[in-house]
Amino acid sequence: MIHAGGRTLGIGVVLALALSGSAHAQARMVTDPLSARAGESRYAGARLMRSGVASQFDSLGREPLGRVGDSVTSYLFGYNDVLSRVVHARITSRQRFLPPVSWRAACDEIAHPGWFYQLSPSATALFAVVVPGSFGRPVNQLPSLTARNGAMQFFHEIADSAWLRYVAYRKPADERSREYMRADFWGPDGDGRYGKLRMFGLKGPEGRTYTAFSFAMRDDRPDVPNTTRIMVVDAWGFPVAASVGNLDMYGTVKDGETDAVLTSSGLIRWDGMQWQIPPVYSEEPCLYHRTMPIPPGARP
């Protein structure tokens, strides 16, 4: 849904307004402006809105997940992130969506520039991820013990640094307060909850094994949201790809001779040269800003 001037506009209304002269002050819809000169992404994902239209956040407009006629897979989730259906569809139309700057403070799925896709067959769900290509249901492919144990040192480099910043920012009044903060930060097992992270094994090039995981520490200062990570590590736990952000991960899917990991923003996928990690959809900093004050001069 689109919110403007205190009103809620359905996608059909927005599409109608976009074709009228009055739409320019609110939002603009551009039909396939980059089809001739921009390549499509093989890993960025989209979300299904209530109307069944897929919405992809892509502020620069350089990585649409596909063009008209391309195959996509929609993963439909019900309550408690339970996967209910997998729908294979094709893109029947693609449009570039350009909202006015004033909408961006709303921090919802259409408050930022991106793409709208009509899909056939269409589908709706409480939550859904649309990814480029044709895939099956994700499986919980467990990582190797060496990968989990080896990656711990890199997790703790981030966690230790975050702990020091957390203490410096909160300035506990006494040792008792400090110990309370320590127990809350590091968790009941004293490992920063590393042992509870969900990790997914996947097969990479030349049959080598890798592991993907994501985490978010609960310590960030209002102006430094930088202790989230998405990581891909090798069989010994050494990072081969990483990105700032936090994604929900749902499992491993077969991707030709290699595997990919299905996430809330698309696919973690080998592109023939390197591991590609989908950009984190902007709802994460938006949700963060809804609960913490925005620093002076910052914009959502």
Image (cartoon, helix red, strand yellow):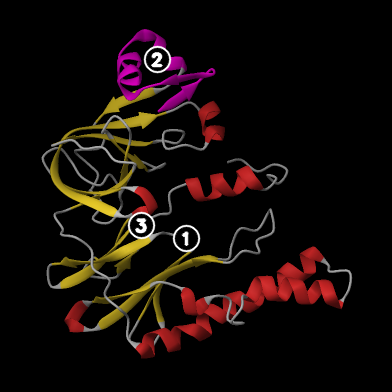
| x and y, in percent, of residue 95 in the image | 27, 31
Near mark 1 (Cα within 10 A), the count class, few <14, some 14-19 or many ≥20, is many
For the residue pair 247 and 34, the one nearer the viewer reads as 247
Near mark 3 (Cα within 10 A), the count class, few <14, some 14-19 or many ≥20, is many
Splitting the image into 4 quarters, where does residue 176 fall?
bottom right
**Which one is earlier in the sequence, the residue at label 1 or at label 2?**
2
* Label 1 with label 2: CB-CB less than 8 Å: no
* Label 1 with label 3: CB-CB less than 8 Å: no
- Tell me the kind of residue under disc 2: Ala
For the residues carrying marks 1 and 3, which lies nearer the camera in this image?
1
The residue range painted magenta reads 1-25
Q: Which residue position holds label 3?
A: 278
**Which one is earlier in the sequence, the residue at label 1 or at label 3?**
1
Distance between the Cα atoms at labels 1 and 2? 35 Å
Per the image, label 3 sits on a secondary structure element best described as: loop
Identify the residue at the far right of this view: 173
